[in-house]
Amino acid sequence: MKQNLSGKTAIVTGGAGGMGSKISRIFAEQGAKVIVADTGADVEGRTEKDPSKVQTIVNEINESGGEAIGCIGDVSDMDHAEGLVRTALENWGKLDILVCAHGILRERMIFNMTEEEWDGSIKSHLKGCFAPTKFASIHWRQERNGGRIIYFTSVAGIRGAAGQPNYSAAHQGKVGLMLSCANALDRYGVTANCISPVASTRMTDRGIGAWESKDEPAPSTTAEGTEKDPKNVVPAIVLLASDLGANITGRVVGATGNQISVWREPERDQTLYSVEPYWDLDRLFQVMPSTLAAESLDPPEFVLP
């Protein structure tokens, strides 16, 4: 089997989770040296760190002939995030790929959500992408040898999920951060993209569409070999992380089952111009109902691929 990541080094945050563990293993199979960065905590991020989960993945990779290092900690902590990049450089002399596959899920309707639930999700998902990206980008700017940034977003971020205002906001925020990085770091040969997956993991067991009958196995435990197997998402990530991905940047790539798609970022649908250099308020109220608002301007429908 051809190794598409031979000689590469990668940091995979959430690298011991349902999706992240697949990425860590397959990256190693593809020839990359991998830092498996995770806390080992539960889906809500409330339990204590569990190093055994990370060490299990690291041991599997190393015993299979790959090379992996485990790093336990909160990726949204600036010191820890800097340490991840430092670990790659001290052990392997370079960093090629950053995949941010970590995250937590604390669901609640907007009118019931607590400040702690909001802040925790934004910190984990969004700051957890910013922190390692900051230090990786410092290295890539100095070396000017290129790099790959891959964040995880979701349909909740692109379309908005009613019971996940914190999760949706964080994942739309990741798209904005990705686009900013794609524009800022292109001159240094760095690409930035988002993956929008649909697969069964511990997080989706808890989230929207979670199985209703607790007498049956959770979907994530029976997903292997089906279209919802997280493994189906990884080929698109490997391609984006490889040399072949050098010309793909600033995109949201959907992956599920046998589908790989590219999302169209928000763009202007219709434009209404005033004959004057500004809009008069009374005039706008007069013409808007028969023009841009002639049809219902509802939010996009939340539908999984």
Image (spheres, grey):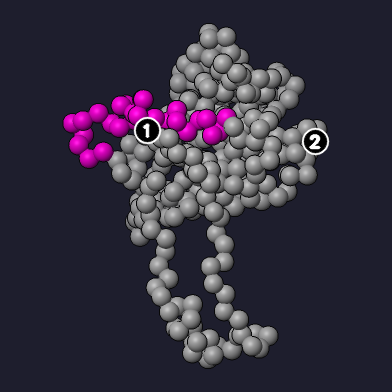
In the shown orientation, is residue 215 left or right of residue 291? left
Q: Residue at x 48, y 25 (%)?
A: 21
Q: Measured from the top left, where is residue 287 in percent x and y?
A: 50, 87
Q: Position of residue 112 (x, y in %)?
A: 34, 56
- Residue 78 visible in this rendered orientation of the protein: no
User: For this rendering, which residue is in front, 272 or 221?
Assistant: 272
Number of numbered discs visible in the structure rendering: 2
Q: Which residue, given by chain and number where applicable, does mark 1 sit on?
A: 227
Residue 265 screen position, x and y as percent: 56, 55
* Picture quadrant of residue 113: bottom left
User: Which region shows up in magenta?
Assistant: 211-238
Residue 237 painted magenta:
yes
Among numbered discs 2 and 1, the one appearing first in the sequence: 2
Q: Residues within 10 Å of mark 1 (few under 14, many from 20)?
A: some
Task: Find numbered disc 2 in the image and state the secondary structure of the residue it sits on.
Answer: loop
Compared to residue 86, the image places residue 64 above or below, namely: above
Relative to residue 298, is residue 145 drawn left or right?
Answer: right
Residue 110: name its quadrant. Answer: bottom left
**Secondary structure beneath disc 1?**
loop
Which numbered marker is on residue 144?
2
